[in-house]
Amino acid sequence: MHDVGKIAGGLVVFLVLVTSPLWYNALSASAPGVPELAKPPNGSQQCVEETEYMRANHMDMLNEWRDDVVRTGERDYTSALTGRTFDMSLSRTCMDCHSNKADFCDRCHDYMAVSPYCWDCHVEPREAE
Amino acid sequence: MDGSRRGFLKYVGLTALGAAGAAGTLRARPPSESEPVHSDAPTAGTVRWAMVIDLRKFASDNVALERCIKACHAAHNVPDFGDDAKNEIKWLWAEDFETAFHSQEFHYLRQDLQGKPTLLLCNHCDNPPCTRVCPTQATWKREHDGIVMMDWHRCIGCRYCIVACPYGSRSFNWTDPRPFVKDAHPEFPTRMRGVVEKCTFCEERLARGREPACVEACANGEIVFGDLNDSESEVRRLLAEHLAIRRKPGLGTQPEVYYIVEDPRTLMEVAPAAVVSEEGEDA
């Protein structure tokens, strides 16, 4: 066995480098930077469903809304939470409250490194200056 | 299969038998299955949207025409490429009368129709060729109201529908249209590069009880929109009382956009008998 020390040492260095992000997060004092999302500027307090549900499932809900509106022509969504009826529209309903796209949608999508292609076609609301 | 000559011949024989069987099954299918039968009878409980364009009411100054096109293209964020014909996107546009109806072979055409700019749009055919060729069902005919609908999320840009449409009603986004949309408004999406688009009879407005944008832009009832299944509707009344033609009727696509081509003098709201007696003085 030649060079056992070099190989073992190399492996240790490799493992430390590969796991360094985990070590860094575990040892650094500050909590990992969970993005702070801005509340709707129009003061609206309740989304169409529970906040927890929306956080986890808004992408599926948007896909269902898209299919309902485009494929079946069904445009009204009745909230299971409040019983209120909403227009199933990204631009008119979602962005009516969450008009601060950069501080809401983008902030979390950037953090999660996802890039939804909604805005290739849908027009984002004009930011209130 | 072993490599012997006998094994090979058995294999070939079985294949030929199978092919013959399949061909027989295909021929046994009744031809009516692939050829939809068309009738004028409405299906109960459904709407059949149609449009009647009254060419008598479009004056030669083209003001009404331009207003309709502008309203449509503004409502749907249709890009304006100026003189760049290759990239042009058309939902509602105008051609002169002879071009719009070239298959009718008008001879010694009435003078007021010669070169008359005529509004064209998707005909929302009863028997649309475009929807048959779409490999992703990104375009299809809605059962409940007859609109030939588009799902821009699903279009893969193969352009078969553009080839299939005999009316040139479909346009392709060769380049990103967003920079060419002036003041894109958030009420309606733009399209992206690589997607086909066309008129949707303003289904997003119909869903909210409004008339199509071009109809709303008309001040004088130049375009009338309504339900063909409703015998009391304005479109049915116009079709019953006037001579209306459709584009390329020989193709059997059954377009649902009609053009009233009568003499503009018939617009004068007088009793039919009076028109006959006045004709001598007008001529």
Image (cartoon, coloured by chain):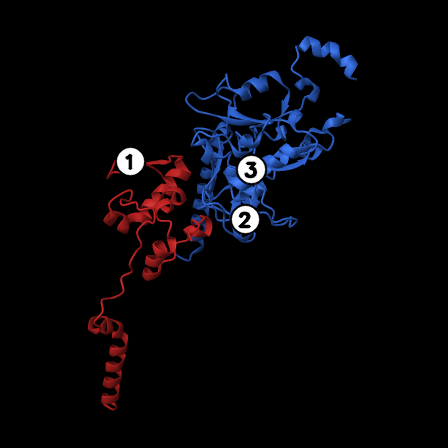
A82 or B243: which is nearer to us?
A: A82
The residue pinned by badge 1 equals A84
Label 2 neighbour load within 10 Å: few <14, some 14-19, many 20+: some
Name the residue located 25 percent from the left edge and 91 percent from the top edge.
A2
In the image, residue B32 lies at what x, y percent?
Answer: 50, 27
Labels 3 and 2: the sequence-earlier one: 3
Q: Are marks 1 and 3 in one subunit? A: no
- What chain is tagged by disc 3? B
Confirm whether residue B129 shows in the render: yes
Which shade of the palette goes to chain A? red
From this view, report whether residue A47 is shown above or below residue B62: below
In the drawing, does residue B273 fall left or right of residue A19?
right
Where disc 3 sits, the SS reads: helix
Question: Tag on residue B71?
Answer: 3
Where disc 1 sits, the SS reads: loop
The residue pinned by badge 2 equals B181
Where disc 2 sits, the SS reads: loop
Amino acid of disc 2: Val
User: Which chain is displayed in blue in the rendered image?
Assistant: B
Label 3 neighbour load within 10 Å: few <14, some 14-19, many 20+: some
From this view, report whether residue B128 is shown above or below residue B12: above
Label 1 neighbour load within 10 Å: few <14, some 14-19, many 20+: few
Quadrant in the picture for the N terminus of chain B: bottom left
- What chain is tagged by disc 1? A
Quadrant in the picture for residue B57: top right
From this view, report whether residue B10 is shown above or below residue A8: above
What's the distance in space between the residues labelled 3 and 2, CA to CA? 14 Å
In the image, residue B177 lies at what x, y percent?
Answer: 54, 51
Amino acid of disc 3: Ala
What's the distance in space between the residues labelled 1 and 3, CA to CA? 33 Å
Amino acid of disc 1: Arg
